[in-house]
Image (cartoon, grey):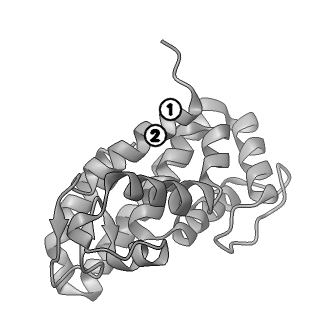
Amino acid sequence: MIVFPEQRIDQLITDEMRAEGWDAYTNDPDDAGKETRWGITVDTARAYGYTGPMRDLPEATARAIYRKRYVDAPRFGDVFAIDPSVGAELIDTGINMGTAVAAMFLQRWLNGFNDTGSRYGDLYVDGQIGPVTLAALRAFIQWRGLKGINVLLCGLKGVKATRYLEITESKRSQRKFLYGWVLNRVVTSP
């Protein structure tokens, strides 16, 4: 069976919703997201026009928010088209840490791997995926191949794990989330 990119992104969104607790409604006082359903925080739902009670947030609305906010707007869908594994990692990180953070992680690693700076131009680390970042990713993959993709993914997951640890070191109340973050977002992420 052939799976088309749109179907793969839809499946990725389903996987992300499961990682976020599927249709569970939560309102943990220690969670900065406050009220959450389908992994969508109340602030995000309101920013995308949902005005009802969070307990009643429809799955279709949550899916549309995931697509707009975490795939289309940050251009992670374009990254996914270049390499689905890197795109999936950015989408996952963007959902949990913010899309600018995810994009900066990619830009920093691409700069770091650009040994002499001769493979592609160094990137301005601005948290925005644009044509220059996409071209650098293509050049990196062309140069380093599948092994390079795997090394890049290790780097992206490593900085994500480090950021989780730093969050818990600066705010002890977040420690109760650390194990789940690392398990669901680093060890078993897409």
Could you tell whether 9 is left or right of 167 in the image? right
Q: Measured along the vertical axis of the image, is residue 173 above or below residue 122?
A: below
x then y, percent, for residue 124: 75, 72
| Residue nearer the viewer, 91 or 105 | 91
Give me the disc on residue 109. none
* Residue 45 picture quarter: bottom left
- Residue 123 relative to residue 173: left or right: right
In the image, residue 87 above or below residue 128: above
Residue 82 quadrant: top right
Residue 147 lies, in percent from the top left, at 57, 33
The residue beneath circle 2 is 10
Q: Amino acid at mark 1?
A: Gln
Report the Cα–Cα distance between label 1 and label 2: 5 Å
Q: Quadrant of residue 122?
A: bottom right
Q: Residue at x 21, y 55 (%)?
A: 23
Disc 1, disc 2: CB below 8 Å?
yes
Label 1: which secondary element: helix
Element type where label 2 sits in the image: helix
* Amino acid at dot 2: Asp
| Residue 169 to residue 95: above or below | below
Farthest-out residue, front? 52
* Residue at x 50% of width, y 40% of height: 9
Q: Residues within 10 Å of mark 1 (few under 14, many from 20)?
A: few
Name the residue carrying label 1: 7
Residue 184 seen anywhere in this rendered image of the structure: yes
Horizontal arrangement in the rendering, residue 97 relative to residue 152 (left or right): left
Q: Is residue 106 above or below residue 163?
A: above
